[in-house]
Image: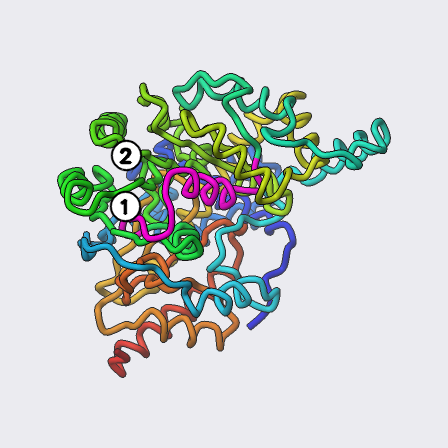
Amino acid sequence: MATAARTESPLYLQIAESMTQQVARGALRPGDRVPSLRRLSRQRRVSMSTALQAYLWLESRGYLEARPQSGFYVRTPFSALIPEPQFEAPKTQPKAVTANAIMAELMESANNPANIPLGAGCASPELYPNRRLNLILRRIVRREPEHSARYDFPPGLEALRRQIARRSPDMGCNFSPRDIAVTCGALEALNLSLRAVAKPGDVIAMEGPTYFGILESAASLGMRVIEIPTNPQCGMDLNQLEAAIRKHRVKACVVMTNSHNPLGYVLPDQYKKALVDLTARWNVPLIEDDVYGDLAHQDLRPRTAKAFDRNGLVILYSSFSKILSPGYRIGWVVAGRFREEVERLKLLTSVASPSLQQRVIAEFLETGGYDRYLKRLRTRLVGQVESVRHAMAKYFPQGTRISRPAGGYMLWIEFPPQINALKLYRAALAENISILPGTIFSATGQYKNHIRINCGHVWSEIYDRALLTLARLCEKAQASRLV
């Protein structure tokens, strides 16, 4: 299969993607008439044939329908008719987590440029503000050529911490720069947080399913995990969480309340508050992953669970990797009453985070334009998620269930039980398509018929063909009952 090209989409696809975003945001609703071909060609300054090509593409994917002598109308999309994955309660017993043997293979396949990247959670490089960041980097190097010759010891560069603090009201918080410590990405922030509140052998409560990196961090620290049933409507089952805390002496709880990975939900504020109140009542630290918080599919950024913290028991961490640049590896953590211990562990673990990258991000945030960039990025990602959902709804076998994310750019897919996700992963890899099997999102090996799909790459015919190939592999698996 062809390698994913990193070129700009054709004009007709850009127009079509823009209209799918309008449908996703509700600006265009089922039954609405869209502009005539002549009007669209004038609006977009394209030829009539390009406008027609865009409408035919949208029609073929179920967004539009042509009515004789009347024009094109928005139809109820295929994806709106597809059910979401069913709730699957995990086993609520503590389990010693071991490093997943397949993780290295999964990361290698996701990193192979010959593969269509539907696995690893990264957006297309062209969506990031690379040119702007490079301009700032060159300016800093010219202005301060010796800047990288010194450490920015914990808690990190003050200029960056100040910019993060200025944005904290959007999260429902009011941080000072001193509350914040800069880390080498989100995973180091998580690792430091776990070490600050627990030790090897302790029990950590996590969502089921949860991001595999959280499970791998617990494994590396010798901690045991208890998975708490989680659904997109109300998050963790708080009755089960309280029972686990009471019975198993849970030392910490790790959650993603905004743009959950892989489920994609944004937890309503009343459930965030209830979660914070419960863990505070039992004096259990709550570690909140907000890596995708800025990518919620709404204009107003959702508040964090940290916004409801009155005791300093909520540790909030995030990263710029999914927003600005994966390669910069700059994250941050607000550790509340555990701040000093997290900073001590940071110094012992990696001494400091990269100085130059901290300065570049600080200047990017300070000089403005971040909010406009973020709005454009969110709009593009919403459209890409919808494009993938529509293609999957059209191509995939009956019985497939697809999540409806309220944030981020991941889809959680549930197949009929006779489709084994790990075997599907290997069959897809033979076709140069990288996906992630659902079992890596569980400490107990659940979700054997689930996969996670990354929608972060600019939609093109290459991805459409990859999904069609994946659908055919599913049909083949069903026919042969690969279990």
What amino acid type should be assigned to the residue bearing mark 1? Ala
Residue shown at the point (17%, 38%) measured from the top left: 238
Q: So how many labels did they put on this image? A: 2
Q: Nearer the viewer, residue 65 or 333?
A: 333
Q: The magenta stretch spans which residues?
A: 183-209
Q: Mark 2 or mark 1: which is in front?
A: 2
Name the quarter where the C terminus is drawn: bottom left
The residue where tag 2 is placed is 284
Residue 76 lies, in percent from the top left, at 28, 45
Q: Is residue 288 left or right of residue 323?
A: left
Residue shown at the point (34%, 50%) measured from the top left: 210
The residue where tag 1 is placed is 205
Q: Earlier in the sequence, mark 2 or mark 1?
A: 1
Q: Is residue 146 left or right of residue 55?
A: right
Q: Is residue 196 magenta?
A: yes
Q: Classify 472 as above or below 111.
A: below
Instruction: Give the secondary structure at mark 1.
Output: strand
Q: Classify 412 as above or below 128.
A: below
Name the quarter where the N terminus is drawn: bottom right
Q: Is residue 214 visible?
A: yes
Quadrant hosting residue 299: top left
Q: Specify few, some or many for label 2: CA neighbours under 10 Å numbering under 14, 14-19, or 20 or more.
A: many
Q: Specify few, some or many for label 1: CA neighbours under 10 Å numbering under 14, 14-19, or 20 or more.
A: many
What amino acid type should be assigned to the residue bearing mark 2? Val
Residue shown at the point (14%, 42%) measured from the top left: 243
Residue 3 lies, in percent from the top left, at 60, 66
Q: Nearer the viewer, residue 316 or 404?
A: 316
Q: Classify 210 as above or below 320.
A: below
Instruction: Give the secondary structure at mark 2.
Output: loop
Determine whether label 2 and label 1 are within 8 Å by CB.
yes
Q: CA distance from mark 2 to mark 1?
A: 10 Å
Tell me the colour scheme of the image: rainbow
